[in-house]
Amino acid sequence: MEPKSKLLVIELWALGDLVLATQFLTAATKTYDVTLLAKPIARELQPHLWPGVQVIPFTFPWTAFTRKYALFAWPWRPLASVIRQLRQSHFDLTVSARWDPRDHFLMALTRAKKRLGFPRLASSLFLTQPLPQPSPEHRYEHWRRLGETLGFNLPSKDQIIFPPRNSRLILIHAGAAQSARIWPLDRFHSMARRLRQENHLVKIACNPDQRQWWLDHAEDVITPGTISELVVLIKTAGLFIGNDSGPGHLAAAMGLPTFTLFGNQFPAAFAPLHPQAEWIEGAPCPYKPCYDSCRFPTPECLYHITEQDAWLKLSSFISRHLPASPDK
């Protein structure tokens, strides 16, 4: 049997972005020897989502939230070392689902024979096969286009199949990597109380810096310290409620219907990848999408979502997707 061609996949950003690559990575391992270049968190995800994928962990300086281009502070020696490692691996092809010239320049540095991506700002110079932007606009569609180009078809986001969940537990995750994506904690707290009044079983998880707030409000909150701890927690649940953040994408990839509170992003482009995912979207803003920063003291687009607004949509979502309570 001939050895598989060596494929390098580049996804340099955060947890949610990595999770959105799951369908592609899983399918690609059937045809290719797949290596993923990604942040170190990918090593934690690998045994849970793509066990057949090798991971090269590295945090590229331009993926930081602040001081991206403070060149004097860049880790130049480790950066040179990882590029040497990529060259010595002699990849047959490399792909990126981002229309990011930095990815494309990095792909050229690997000296892979074929380099597929979505060009922007003349970055087609670094690609051997520039691809047209797909439509519709969800980020997953770029992975689907790459898969199609490489000869395997990925399901549309509405056709991904997950086994049914039997748990009646509702998991609320109140955290996110950036404060601009966090709905106020007191509103999450009110929602949890109301769900319990409706005889629902609820667990709350949060970021470490939120933990004391929840303890002060008499909640037995869970603070996952690793991806594996978060995975174990998600496995106990039947539904997920949270911000536009990595834990919601991970929950969807593990089969949970998700309800997301969107502020500075468009759900059409970044909704969790589950056919039963639902959401509520915040107020319009001329600066959307503003990703992880906000021009205002508070993210008014997200704060515009009231408890009552969220409850009206959430209660309908729960009634459709959660097994009926024996008390009802």
Image (spheres, helix red, strand yellow):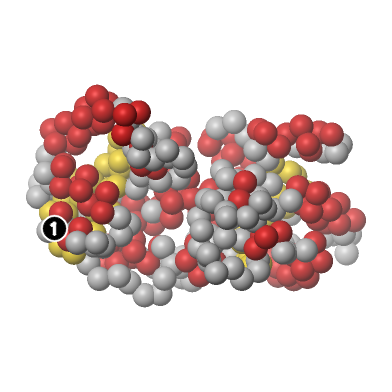
Q: Residue at x 78, y 63 (%)?
A: 306
| Residue corresponding to mark 1 | 125
Residue under the point 26% across and 67% down: 148
As drawn, the residue found furthest toward the top would be 77
The x and y percentages for residue 258 are 62, 59
Horizontal side of 34 relative to 154 (left or right) equals left
Amino acid type, mark 1:
Leu
Q: Is residue 125 above or below residue 282?
A: above
Number of residues whose C-alpha sits closer than 10 Å to that of mark 1, classed few (under 14), some (14–19) or many (20 or more) = some
> Where does residue 270 sit, x and y in percent of width and height?
50, 62
Please name the residue shown 40% across and 34% down the image. Answer: 40
**If the image is split into quadrants, where does the C terminus sit?**
bottom right
* Helix, strand or loop at mark 1: helix
Spot occupied by residue 291 in the image (x, y as percentages of width and height)? 50, 55
Q: Depth check: 264 or 11 in front?
A: 264
State the residue at coordinates (21%, 29%). 80
